Image: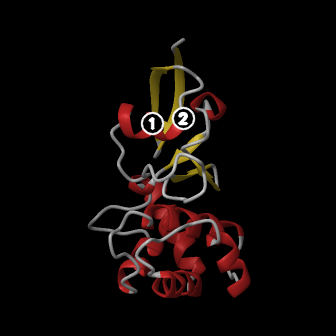
């Protein structure tokens, strides 16, 4: 049975009329037209559907939208703009981390969550944060290089996020 659910997505308050058990991924893509999170497996195993709920990366394919009512949700579209990339997005571009691009949304979201909780991650922390994200193209070395680069200037990440929020 449909219910009116209030969400904050990419800084905008929205309401959707869906069953509370509907996967958050379906609401983001089908009802709100956001294409950043991808449907990969539907089992929370590949990471393509990752979004931030608060500062935590979650697999939106298995999170019921009713569980995130009123919470702040950020998708790839909410991080940066094509003309002004978020520092993590810029690091992924600079390191040619994307080949087909399908998994990169989840990798970027996981990296942002990692750097918010651990601004100076070591190699183990980086690999742990990405361990459940699958890249079928095999660009793992480039992805790791991108995360390392983004972590070099964590204050820049915090400043960029503060500037985005202010504008």
Q: Is residue 36 left or right of residue 153?
A: left
Q: Residue 26, which numbered label?
A: 1
Residue 23, given in percent of the width and then of the height, sits at 54, 35
Question: Quarter holding the N terminus?
Answer: top right
Q: Residue at x 48, y 69 (%)?
A: 160
The single residue placed furthest to the left in the displayed view is: 83
Q: Nearer the viewer, residue 109 or 163?
A: 109
Q: Residue 23, which numbered label?
A: 2
Q: Nearer the viewer, residue 62 or 165?
A: 62
Q: Residue at x 43, y 67 (%)?
A: 104
Colour pattern: secondary structure
Name the element at disc 1. Answer: helix
Quadrant for residue 19, please give it: top right
Name the element at disc 2. Answer: loop
Instruction: Tell me if residue 119 can be seen.
Output: no
Instruction: Tell me if residue 34 can be seen.
Output: yes
Tell me if mark 1 has few (under 14), some (14-19) or many (20+) residues whose alpha carbon lies within 10 angstroms of its own: many
- Evaluate if marks 2 and 1 touch, with contact meaning CB atoms under 8 Å apart: yes
Quadrant for residue 92, please give it: bottom left
Q: Residue at x 53, y 46 (%)?
A: 42
Q: Residue at x 61, y 39 (%)?
A: 63
Residue 34, given in percent of the width and then of the height, sits at 36, 44
Q: Is residue 73 left or right of residue 121?
A: left
Q: Residue 149, which numbered label?
A: none
In this rendering, the answer to whether 148 lies above or below 9 is below
In this rendering, the answer to whether 44 lies above or below 119 is above
Tell me if mark 2 has few (under 14), some (14-19) or many (20+) residues whose alpha carbon lies within 10 angstroms of its own: many
**Cα separation between marks 2 and 1:** 5 Å
Question: Quarter holding the C terminus?
Answer: bottom left
Residue 123, given in percent of the width and then of the height, sits at 68, 87
In this rendering, the answer to whether 78 lies above or below 23 is below
């Amino acid at each position: 049975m449909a219910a009116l659910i209030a969400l904050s997505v990419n800084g905008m308050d929205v309401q959707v009329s869906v069953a509370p058990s509907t996967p958050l991924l379906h609401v983001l893509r089908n009802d709100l037209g956001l294409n950043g999170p991808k449907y990969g497996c539907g089992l929370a195993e590949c990471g393509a559907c990752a979004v931030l709920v608060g500062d935590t990366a979650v697999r939106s394919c298995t999170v019921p939208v009713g569980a995130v009512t009123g919470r702040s949700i950020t998708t790839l579209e909410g991080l940066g703009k094509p003309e002004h990339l978020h520092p993590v997005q810029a690091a992924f571009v600079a390191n040619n981390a994307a080949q087909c691009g399908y998994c990169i949304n989840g990798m970027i979201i996981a990296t942002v969550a990692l750097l918010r909780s651990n601004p100076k991650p070591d190699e183990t922390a980086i690999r742990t944060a990405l361990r459940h994200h699958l890249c079928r193209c095999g660009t793992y070395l480039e992805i790791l290089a991108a995360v390392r680069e983004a972590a070099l200037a964590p204050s820049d990440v915090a400043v960029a996020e503060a500037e985005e929020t202010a504008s």
